[in-house]
Image: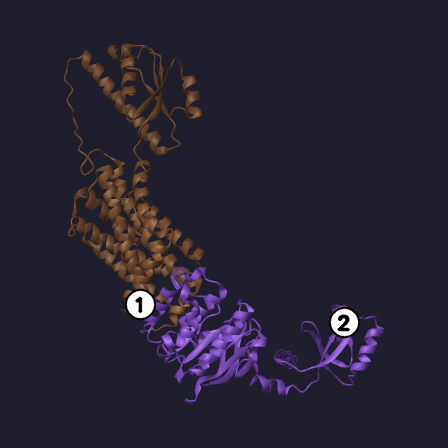
Chain colours: A brown, B purple
Amino acid sequence: MSTLKVLIKKEVLQFKRNSFLPKLVIVFPIMIMLVLPWVTTMDVRHINVSVVDNDHSQFSARLIAKIDASDYFTLHSVTASFTPSMQMLEKGEVDAILEIPADYEKSMVTGEPKKLNVSANSVNATKGSLGSQYLAQTIGKAVQELRASHMPVKSSELVTIQNRYNPTLEYRNFMIPGLMVMLLIIVTGFLPALNFVSEKEIGTIEQINVTPVNRFTFTLAKLIVYWVAGLIVITIAMLVAWLVYGLAPIGSLLTIYAISFLFILVISGFGLIASNISGTMQQAIFFMLFFVMVFMLMSGLFTPTESMPQWAQYITYILPPRYFVSTMRAVYLKGATFIDMRYNFYALAAFAVVMNLGAALTYRKQS
Amino acid sequence: MNDTLAIEVKGLSKSYGNVQALDKVTFDVHRGEIFGYIGPDGAGKTTLFKILVTLLNADEGSASVDGLDVAKDYRAIRSRVGYMPGKFSLYPDLTIEENMDFFATLFGVNVEQNYDLVAPIYKQIEPFKKRRAGRLSGGMKQKLALSCALIHKPSVLFLDEPTTGVDAVSRSEFWDMLFNLREQGLSILVSTPYMDEASRCDRIALVNNGRVLDIDTPQGMVDKYDKHLYGIKAGDMYELLKTLREESSIASCYTAGEYHHAVAGNGFDAAALKQRLITAGFCNVDIKQLAPDIEDVFIHLLSNEQ
């Protein structure tokens, strides 16, 4: 039997014997894909609104009904004055207050409209600003309807909006390809790093180093196992995305597997560097953790890189996940092809060479 | 290169920062010899072994194993030596059988090929071959480690503290295995902190703080000991030690189990000393002349060093 084969066989045996790893590769992607797309959402929904109705008109009743009916809002309460509503806002029971002044409907008809007042809790800036915007839109529509009923002039829609690639504006569809990237970072970056360091900690690496096995074969055997594990993980994640969320890639699967494999090469090489420069599991974990944080928050996984300050955008160019995330999203949602994404492929290929070269240079069989 | 030498070490030095782990170590191991590298913890034993099995580079000096230079021909050396590190370092999650097969294949052999060499040792653990290495007892781990180190039929065997943490019966069995291997023509370098194991080697080097104090056969070491050694005991051993250390007719005195060992100095008279001790209030005083062992030689060499 060839050396590589026996080394792979040993890695697979150890992998299977481990009480934790096989579960991690199967259960982890399923868990992440089942739970996180629901919770990591930037969609603002179910904003609790308290309405201060000083008008008591037909219009105010219609406006309240509109708010109640909307999926974006939950009508929390209708009060007679501002103070009790404000108290609720302070307690955190409501997110926004809409105050309708007295004789509002009448003022509309007379042509000198009074002003509606919206107060929103903006501790969470996104929720605060989006909440008040949604509220303003809803009011705008109601006002338009009211005007239309008084003046029989047909108000035409001036603007039509088409949300390309993600027609229902689901934040989930943006997140799912990103979560797949995160899974690969953990399974094919963290795990091999920890595996190599554990051989150092147990001392088995010394026993291996006195055999004629060369380091390249030894390393390759380990990596092959994690490469396969990575491809299994991405497959499971795609299956869950399709079965649970009905999200299937518009582009070709081949492109997705190709970019995933390139990324796996990059991140496993990075894991190797981490294991080479760490003597213990703890060192390796903290080294990886630092970079994983940067990868997750700066690569456009959660927030678009385009909205980062210019200097930060420059930094993102040296973060390999950036290229992977954008390719995954483009292939998944826009159906981009290899040709469209070729620069990302080239960038990741270059990173794969650099990382693995770095790993080879930091490895020492002798000290 | 001398072909009758299994290991040739010349002026080997290695330091870690300020700590001099090896200080110009020089010695030879003949073919078919069990050579003991004897010294306390921190004597530089493991450092020496790592250099000889090509895991570590020396700062100065040269060494060759089986006629091959450890720095230049490290690749060739790796297939000719068997190394058993002090710490058990086989895969704990693989079974006995899987560990054996694995290491055999890495050396390009299979277990059957060299079964004769490992059989006397491996047979003892073979009934448990489906058991994972991590769940073996200390003695069984040691036998497995030795089997794995022998599976490719090395010509030189390096055993770094093989008997540390192993019970007395297993230790004795282990040495019998080594004698058996020597008969098969293997050269063995073994390190140990236990002085009582030194006498079972063909030749020994006594080392301390990275320096070789002396090299000889165990008997030769003992024969060179030119002092008179006495064993002294009494009811209160601690007080006795303090008293003896102040005694002018005793060159040095140290604890060694039931009796304190005292090296006789000028004007030593056992009967007179016993009388003095009894007068000083010690009960059950007993003084007898002793034949020195390796430990006494080691302590003597140490005192000469300082």
Task: Name the residue: 40% across, 32% down.
Answer: A123
Amino acid marked by disc 2: Ala
Q: Position of residue A154 (x, y in %)?
A: 14, 17
Q: Is residue A348 above or below residue B35?
A: above
Is residue B8 shown left or right of residue A49? right
Residue occupied by mark 2? B234
Q: Position of residue A209 (x, y in %)?
A: 38, 70
Q: Quadrant of the N terminus of chain A?
A: bottom left
Q: Is residue A359 above or below residue B196?
A: above
Residue occupied by mark 1? A216
> Residue A53 versus residue B163: which sits nearer the camera?
B163
Which residue ends up furthest to the front in the rendered image? B127
Task: Name the residue: 19% across, 44% down.
Answer: A249
> Residue A338 versus residue B187: which sits nearer the camera?
B187
> Residue A75 versus residue A32: which sits nearer the camera?
A32
Q: Position of residue A148 (x, y in %)?
A: 18, 15
Q: Chain of mark 1?
A: A
Q: Nearer the viewer, mark 1 or mark 2?
A: 2
Residue A219 quadrant: bottom left
**Label 2 residue SS:** loop
User: Callout 2: 10 Å neighbours few (<14), some, many (20+)?
Assistant: many
Q: Is residue A305 visible?
A: no
Q: Chain of mark 2?
A: B
